[in-house]
Image: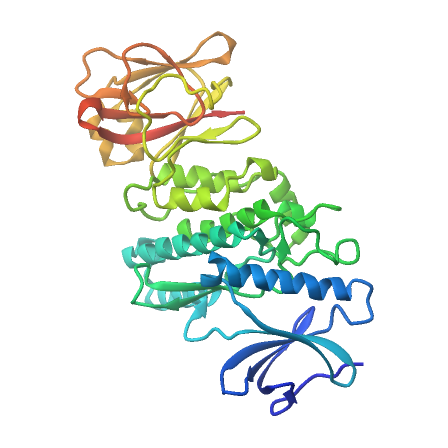
């Protein structure tokens, strides 16, 4: 039976300098290589060399390591630097990874922020510096996940503690990201050798629906689900499903109990609060096919979402840039429902179930740009067949816009259409409200 190493022990060319402690699958150590370079060493308890899938696991780890090294993910994920089998009281498998330091994981950084604001009695959600930092972390994090997914790698155990951030003033974002704890990550195009022998790694309150469904395999969309939980924490200040009861967590996840978040600040232009809020909510769909990709989510955080992203269920989200025409978009479904929701730039929403005149008073809740609306700007009403139609009111100071184009006649609304006021010829769009059906 293999035994635990201690400080000062040597295994191959590595000398153990620190014991981090046992995890579920492996014991972790800090170690030094022959030239003094630091490595993060893992000694595996599972799989043991005696299990039937051990050799396949070793080959799988080698392929995983190669994909990280040879792709854009090398900038954002810990690299495997060595792997070997050795006898230490018994045969066992070891992997050595690059050692990350001079930073902190996202969980530590959030905990430190909360403690500082608790001591100073200063609400974190009102601190512009905190908001700006969280937006940067969100973008850096999603850039790393998108790069990982390019290499067809599913992290499969995302959580704030596995996103390590290092301040680096030499790069534009100011932070380097290293995704850690990836030894049980998955190849999206190859079944894991432990499938059918043991479950998939995940962490309480961060598991995707696929982690919890019998026979299901976490995929790229599973990472996107967990990313959204983390982005809710960063951008809205709360985890939508946090609970100490994991049976209750599973119920909340499966029932899609989360609401589109009201963001804690204003996204930097050209990103839109309404767009970001809508995308984060879509990421939490129990159906993985309805979730956007990591690359799409990263683009929306920067306001670079060029086209509506349409789910197989028929929902769509408007692009961050208005289309050139408000003509019906073939990709988006008509809104056919008893009620409709208008989602504002800050994530607030207005639900409507009857004929409603939209104007300054009604939309004031969405912010100061309501002053650009007339008291009677346009009319929203449900016609036969549950079709919602938007009609302009003549003589308004500013034009009613749908997807950036002036509304001159009744228009059948589609999922993700953006209703605003402004001037089409000058490209002025004020306070866009995203329309979507409510069931």
Q: Is residue 55 left or right of residue 290?
A: right
Where is residue 256? Give x, y as percent: 58, 38
Residue at x 32% of width, y 29% of height: 322
Residue at x 75% of width, y 54% of height: 195
The extreme top residue here reads 384
Where is residue 75? Give x, y as percent: 45, 62
Q: Is residue 175 left or right of residue 415?
A: left
Q: Is residue 126 above or below residue 306?
A: below
Colouring style = rainbow
Where is residue 324? Give x, y as percent: 30, 24
Q: Quadrant of residue 221?
A: top right
Residue 95 appears in the rendering: no
Q: Is residue 270 above or below residue 333?
A: below
Residue 66 appears in the rendering: yes
Q: Quadrant of residue 421?
A: top left
Where is residue 261? Give x, y as percent: 44, 42
């Amino acid at each position: 039976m293999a035994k635990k190493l201690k400080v000062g022990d040597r295994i191959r060319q590595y000398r153990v300098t620190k014991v981090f402690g046992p995890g579920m699958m492996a014991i972790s150590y800090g170690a030094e290589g022959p030239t003094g370079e630091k490595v993060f060493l893992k000694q595996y308890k599972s799989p043991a060399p005696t299990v039937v899938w051990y050799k396949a696991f070793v080959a799988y780890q080698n392929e995983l390591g190669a994909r990280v090294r040879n792709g854009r993910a090398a900038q954002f994920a810990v690299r495997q630097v060595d792997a070997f089998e050795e006898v230490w009281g018994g045969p066992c498998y070891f992997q050595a990874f690059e050692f990350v330091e001079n930073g902190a994981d996202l969980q530590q950084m959030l905990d430190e922020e909360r403690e500082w604001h608790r001591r100073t009695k200063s609400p974190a959600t009102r601190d512009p510096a905190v908001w700006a930092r969280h937006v940067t972390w969100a973008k850096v994090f999603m850039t790393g996940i998108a790069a990982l997914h390019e290499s067809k790698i599913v992290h499969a155990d995302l959580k704030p503690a596995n996103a390590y951030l290092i301040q680096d003033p030499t790069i534009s974002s100011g932070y380097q990201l290293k995704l850690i704890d990836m030894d049980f990550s998955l190849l999206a195009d190859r079944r894991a050798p432990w499938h059918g022998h043991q479950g998939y790694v995940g962490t309480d309150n961060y598991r995707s629906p696929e982690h919890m469904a019998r026979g299901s395999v976490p995929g790229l969309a599973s990472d996107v689900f967990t990313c959204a939980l983390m982005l809710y924490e960063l951008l809205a200040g709360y985890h939508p499903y946090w609970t100490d009861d994991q049976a209750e967590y599973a119920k909340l996840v499966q029932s899609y109990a989360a609401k589109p978040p009201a963001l804690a600040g204003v996204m930097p232009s050209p990103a839109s609060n309404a767009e970001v809020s809508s995308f984060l909510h879509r990421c939490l769909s129990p159906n993985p096919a309805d979730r956007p990709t990591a690359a799409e989510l990263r683009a929306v955080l920067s306001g670079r979402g060029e086209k509506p992203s349409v789910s197989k269920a028929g929902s769509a989200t408007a692009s961050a840039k208005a289309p050139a025409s408000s003509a019906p978009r073939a990709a988006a479904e008509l809104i056919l429902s008893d009620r409709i929701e208008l989602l504002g730039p800050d994530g607030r929403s207005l639900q409507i179930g009857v004929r409603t005149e939209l104007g300054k008073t009604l939309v004031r809740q969405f912010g100061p740009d309501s002053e650009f609306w007339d008291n009677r700007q346009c009319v929203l009403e449900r016609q036969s067949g549950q079709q919602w139609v938007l009609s302009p009111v003549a003589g308004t100071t500013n034009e009613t816009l749908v997807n950036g184009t002036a509304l001159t006649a009744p228009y059948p609304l589609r999922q993700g259409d953006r209703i605003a006021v402004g001037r089409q010829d000058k490209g002025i769009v004020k306070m866009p409200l995203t329309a979507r059906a409510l069931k």
